[in-house]
C-alpha cells in the first residue's frame, strides 16, 4: 500500500533580479543547504535527488547533470522533471510520489532559475509557441496579452474596477515587505501603483511578475522517517494535475467549458471532502503570474463565489491578517524564478502550516493549505498540504 | 519487490535518418495510438501521461505542450521527464507504486535530424570552464574511450566487433535504421570522428518515437495475456566534471545496477538474465557498460565480446535489436530498450527473438560519458 509523504525541510534563496556573485550551481546549493539545515539532516541522509528548471532560460542542456555539484546528487538516484511554469509543483509532486512508492525514505527536490544569465528576460519564452503557426504572432507579448484580457474581462463581467487590481498589488507588496526572501519589496502606495505604466491596458508594469534569480528546495520523507525527525512534518494530503491543451487564449476563455483551474479544484475538493473551501482550507499560495490573475484564478479555485473576489479584496480578507489569506509571501508578482516559482508556493504553504513563516505568518490557524502551479498552454497543478496525518 | 507494476503494451516507430514528413508530436501520436489500440484503452482510461523529451533537442520551449495535446491530455494530466526514456518508465513505475495512478502512458519522441546534436551537447557543459573548450558528447566519449582502452588494453578491433554484432542483429529488427553485414576491417577503415571513435563506431542521427502503457497489477490481466513485470529499477548520478571521475570505470552504472539487482533478487546477472538491451551510443560503451552491469569483471569487456558471450547464440545476447548503433534517437533510447526487452519476454521479437527469455535487462543513460544511468529488470 502506498505510503504517506511529508515535507520535513524547506529552503530558498533570497530572491533577486541579479546574482552575479554566484554561479547557477552555487545558487542551487544555497537553497539545498537551507532545506537540509531546516530538516536537520545532511546530504548523506538523502537517498534520491530530483531536480527541475526551465532550461532554455539559461541556455544550458541537461541542467540536472551540472546541478549535481550543487544538489549533492553524486552517486544518488534521481532525475529531471520539467513542465514549464508548473515545474516547481510537478517536481514537488514527484518527490511525494517517490516517497509514497515505498522505494525511498528521504528525497531532496530542488528547482531554480537564474534569469540574469538569460539573453534578456522573457525572450526564451518566445520559443514556447509552435514554430510553424503561433510563434510569429506571440513573440514578446504572449503572457502580457493574456493577462490584459483577463483584466478587461474580469472588470466587464464582475463590476470590479482598476482600483481593485491596485488593491491586490498593494496587498502583495505589503506581504512581500514582510517576507525577507521576496524579490520585489517596494513599499508601494496606491498612487504609485496607479502611476505604473500600462504594458497593455489594463495590465500595468507592476502587475506582471518580475524576472528573478533564485532557487528553492524541499526535503520529503516517509511517515516512519518523518516521525523520528526533529522538524515538524507537513503532509502531502493529495495532488491533482489538469491540463487545458489548446495553446493561446482558449485556456483562459474556454467558451462554454470550465477552465483547468476549476476542473482541478473540483476534483481536489470532492476527493478530500472539502465542501466549504474557505473553512476547510485556511490559506492559499497560488501561482498568479499577474495581479489580474489573482482575482480571476481565486474565483476559479472557489476561494470566492463567481464575481465576488474583488469584494473580498476590498474588505482585506486576503491579507495576512484576513479571513482567507492568499499569497502571504507576496506571491509571483513579487518573486518569479520561473522553474522554481511553483515550488516556492508549496514551500511557503508548508511554512504557514508549521507556523514558521515569521513576519508573514498568517494570523489564522492553518491546518490545511493549498498550493498551486500554472504553466504550459493552460496547465493547473494543485497540492493539498495538512498539519496532521489525517 | 513483488509483481506490482506491469507493462501491457509497447510500440515503436521505425527509426529513420530523418522524418521530414512528420512533426515530432506526430511521431508521439503514432506510437501512442498503437498502444491504446493494443490494450483497447482510450484517453479517458489514462490516469496520466509521462512524456520524455528535451526542449533543446526540439528547438522549442516547454516542448511537451504540443505532445501532451495529441496524447489526449485535455482535462487530463501529463508530466515530462527531461532525461532518458528509461527514466520516464522508471518514474511511471514509481507513480503507480505511489498509489496515485493505476494506468500510465509513457511516450518518448525525438527528431535528432532537426538540431545539430554536437551544438546542443556542448550546452550540457558548464558555461564557465568547459563549454568554451568545445566539448560535446562525442569528444567526451572519445576521451573516455581512450582512457578505458588504455587502462584495460581494450583494442579497436574489440570495439569494432560490437558494431559488427549490432548491425548484423539489426537485420532481424524491422524498426532498425541501419543494418548490414560488415567486417571489422570496414569499421576500422571508416573516417575518424574523434579518435579513437570512427564513424561506424557511433550511433547515427535518428528520428523516431516509442510508447508503452504501465498499469497496476490488478488492471494488467484484463488488458493483455502477456504482461511483463518490472522486477527492479535503479538510477544513479556520477560526478559532473569528467576530471572528477575515473573514466575507465562506470561507478554510477554499477550502483544503479546494484540497486536494480537487489530489488529483483538477482545475484549473478550473467546467469540469471536471459537477454539485455543496453544503450551504447559508441561501440566502446557496450564493453564498458557490460563491466558496469556486472556481466564481466572490470577490464574484461573486450574478451566478453571476443568469446561470443553477448552474441545471439551466447550466454547473454546483448542488443538483439542492434541497439543504438543501428539507429535510435537519444532520450527515446532507454524507452526503446525497454520496449525491445518487453517484446523478448512476450516472445514477440520475431527473427531477433532469444528463445525462452524469462528475465531481461534494459538500460538507458544521459549526460557526458554516461553521468546519469538507469537500469531496469523485467520479468515474465
Image (cartoon, coloured by chain):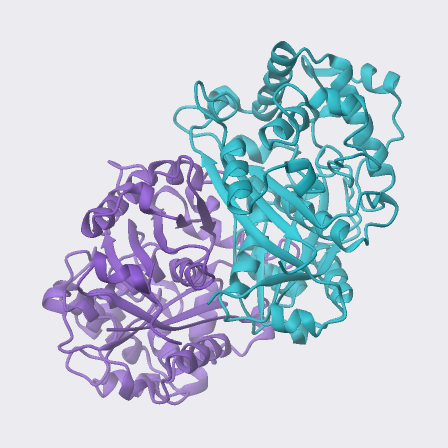
| Residue B94 visible in the current orientation | yes
Instruction: Write down the quadrant of residue B7 in the picture.
Output: bottom left
Is B318 left, or right, of B266 in this rendering?
left
Of A378 and A4, the residue lying toward us: A4
Is A373 left, or right, of B221 in this rendering?
right
For image coordinates 73% across by 61% down, the residue present is A35
**Residue A243 vertical placement versus A88 (above, below):** above
Instruction: Write down the quadrant of residue B299 in the picture.
Output: bottom left
Image coordinates for residue B40, horizontal then vertical, percent: 20, 48
Residue that protrudes farthest toward the left in the picture: B351
Image coordinates for residue B288, horizontal then vertical, percent: 39, 78
Image coordinates for residue A47, horizontal then vertical, percent: 58, 72
For image coordinates 10% across by 67% down, the residue present is B351
| Residue B370 visible in the current orientation | no
Total numbered labels placed on residues in the image: 0
Of B79 and B315, the residue lying toward us: B79
**Residue B365 vertical placement versus A206 (above, below):** below
Is A368 left, or right, of B313 in this rendering?
right
**Residue B14 vertical placement versus B19 (above, below):** below
Image coordinates for residue A104, horizontal then vertical, percent: 54, 70
Picture colour for chain B: purple
Instruction: Write down the quadrant of residue A341 in the picture.
Output: top right
Q: Quadrant of the C terminus of chain A?
A: bottom right
Tell me the cyan chain.
A
For image coordinates 78% across by 41% down, the residue present is A329
Amino acid at each position: 500500500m502506498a505510503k504517506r509523504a511529508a515535507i520535513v525541510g524547506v529552503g530558498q534563496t533570497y530572491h533577486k533580479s541579479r546574482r552575479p556573485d554566484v554561479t547557477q550551481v552555487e545558487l542551487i546549493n544555497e537553497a539545498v543547504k537551507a532545506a537540509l539545515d531546516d530538516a536537520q539532516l545532511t546530504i548523506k541522509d538523502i537517498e534520491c535527488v530530483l531536480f527541475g528548471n526551465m532550461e532554455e532560460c539559461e541556455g544550458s542542456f541537461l541542467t540536472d547533470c551540472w546541478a549535481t555539484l550543487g544538489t549533492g546528487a553524486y552517486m544518488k538516484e534521481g532525475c529531471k522533471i520539467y513542465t514549464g511554469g508548473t515545474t516547481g509543483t510537478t517536481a514537488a509532486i514527484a518527490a511525494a510520489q517517490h516517497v509514497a512508492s515505498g522505494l525511498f525514505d528521504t528525497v531532496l527536490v530542488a528547482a531554480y532559475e537564474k534569469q540574469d544569465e538569460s539573453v534578456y528576460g522573457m525572450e526564451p519564452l518566445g520559443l514556447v509557441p509552435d514554430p510553424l503557426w503561433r510563434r510569429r504572432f506571440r513573440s514578446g507579448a504572449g503572457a502580457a496579452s493574456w493577462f490584459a484580457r483577463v483584466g478587461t474581462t474580469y472588470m466587464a463581467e464582475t463590476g470590479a474596477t482598476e482600483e481593485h487590481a491596485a488593491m491586490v498589488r498593494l496587498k502583495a507588496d505589503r506581504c512581500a515587505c514582510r517576507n525577507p526572501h521576496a524579490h520585489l519589496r517596494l513599499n508601494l502606495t496606491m498612487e504609485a501603483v496607479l502611476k505604473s505604466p500600462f504594458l497593455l491596458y489594463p495590465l500595468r508594469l507592476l502587475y506582471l511578475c518580475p524576472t528573478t534569480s533564485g532557487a528553492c528546495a524541499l526535503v520529503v520523507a516517509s511517515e516512519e522517517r518523518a516521525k523520528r525527525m526533529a522538524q515538524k512534518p507537513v503532509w502531502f494530503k493529495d495532488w491533482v494535475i489538469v491540463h487545458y491543451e489548446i495553446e493561446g487564449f482558449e485556456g483562459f476563455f474556454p467558451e462554454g467549458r470550465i477552465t483547468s483551474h476549476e476542473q482541478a479544484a473540483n476534483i481536489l475538493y470532492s476527493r478530500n471532502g472539502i465542501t466549504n473551501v474557505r473553512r476547510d482550507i485556511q490559506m492559499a499560495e497560488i501561482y498568479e503570474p499577474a495581479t489580474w490573475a489573482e482575482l480571476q484564478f481565486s474565483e476559479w479555485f472557489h476561494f470566492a463565489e463567481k464575481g465576488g473576489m474583488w469584494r473580498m479584496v476590498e474588505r482585506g480578507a486576503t491579507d495576512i491578517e484576513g479571513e482567507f489569506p492568499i499569497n502571504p509571501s507576496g506571491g509571483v508578482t513579487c518573486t518569479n524564478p520561473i522553474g522554481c516559482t511553483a515550488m516556492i508556493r508549496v514551500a511557503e504553504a508548508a511554512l504557514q502550516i508549521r507556523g514558521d513563516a515569521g513576519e508573514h505568518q498568517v494570523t489564522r490557524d492553518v491546518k490545511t493549505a493549498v498550493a498551486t502551479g500554472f504553466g504550459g498552454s493552460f496547465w493547473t497543478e494543485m497540492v493539498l498540504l495538512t498539519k496532521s496525518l489525517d | 519487490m513483488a509483481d506490482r507494476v506491469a507493462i501491457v503494451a509497447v510500440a515503436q516507430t521505425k527509426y529513420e535518418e530523418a522524418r521530414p514528413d512528420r512533426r515530432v508530436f506526430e511521431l508521439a501520436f503514432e506510437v501512442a495510438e498503437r498502444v491504446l489500440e493494443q490494450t483497447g484503452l482510450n484517453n479517458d482510461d489514462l490516469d496520466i501521461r509521462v512524456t520524455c523529451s528535451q526542449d533543446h533537442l526540439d528547438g522549442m520551449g516547454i516542448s511537451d505542450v504540443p505532445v501532451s495535446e495529441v496524447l489526449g491530455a485535455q482535462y487530463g494530466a501529463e508530466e515530462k521527464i527531461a532525461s532518458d526514456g528509461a527514466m520516464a518508465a522508471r518514474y511511471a513505475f514509481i507513480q503507480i507504486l505511489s498509489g496515485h495512478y493505476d494506468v500510465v502512458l509513457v511516450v518518448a519522441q525525438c527528431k535528432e535530424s532537426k538540431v545539430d546534436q554536437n551544438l546542443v551537447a556542448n550546452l550540457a557543459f558548464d558555461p564557465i570552464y568547459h563549454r568554451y573548450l568545445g566539448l560535446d558528447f562525442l569528444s567526451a566519449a572519445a576521451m573516455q574511450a581512450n582512457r578505458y582502452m588504455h587502462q584495460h588494453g581494450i583494442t579497436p578491433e574489440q570495439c569494432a566487433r560490437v558494431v559488427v554484432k549490432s548491425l548484423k542483429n539489426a537485420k532481424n529488427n524491422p524498426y532498425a535504421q541501419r543494418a548490414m553485414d560488415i567486417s571489422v576491417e570496414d569499421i576500422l577503415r571508416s573516417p575518424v570522428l574523434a579518435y579513437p571513435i570512427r564513424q561506424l563506431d557511433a550511433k547515427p542521427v535518428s528520428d523516431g518515437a516509442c510508447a508503452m502503457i504501465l498499469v497496476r497489477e490488478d488492471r494488467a490481466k484484463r488488458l493483455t495475456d502477456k504482461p511483463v513485470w518490472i522486477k527492479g529499477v535503479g538510477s544513479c548520478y556520477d560526478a559532473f566534471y569528467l576530471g572528477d571521475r575515473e573514466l575507465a570505470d562506470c561507478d554510477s552504472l554499477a550502483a544503479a545496477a546494484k540497486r536494480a539487482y537487489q530489488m529483483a533478487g538477482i545475484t549473478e546477472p550473467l546467469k540469471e538474465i536471459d537477454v539485455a538491451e543496453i544503450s551504447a551510443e559508441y561501440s566502446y560503451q557496450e564493453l564498458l557498460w557490460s563491466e558496469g552491469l556486472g556481466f564481466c569483471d572490470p577490464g574484461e569487456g573486450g574478451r566478453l565480446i571476443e568469446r561470443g558471450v553477448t552474441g545471439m547464440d551466447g550466454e547473454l545476447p546483448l542488443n538483439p535489436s542492434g541497439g543504438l548503433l543501428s539507429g535510435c534517437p537519444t532520450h527515446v533510447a532507454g524507452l526503446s530498450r525497454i520496449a525491445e526487452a518487453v517484446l523478448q519476454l512476450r516472445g514477440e521479437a520475431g527473427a531477433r527473438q532469444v528463445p525462452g527469455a524469462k528475465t531481461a535487462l534494459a538500460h538507458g543513460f544521459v549526460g557526458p560519458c554516461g553521468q546519469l544511468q538507469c537500469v531496469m529488470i523485467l520479468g515474465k
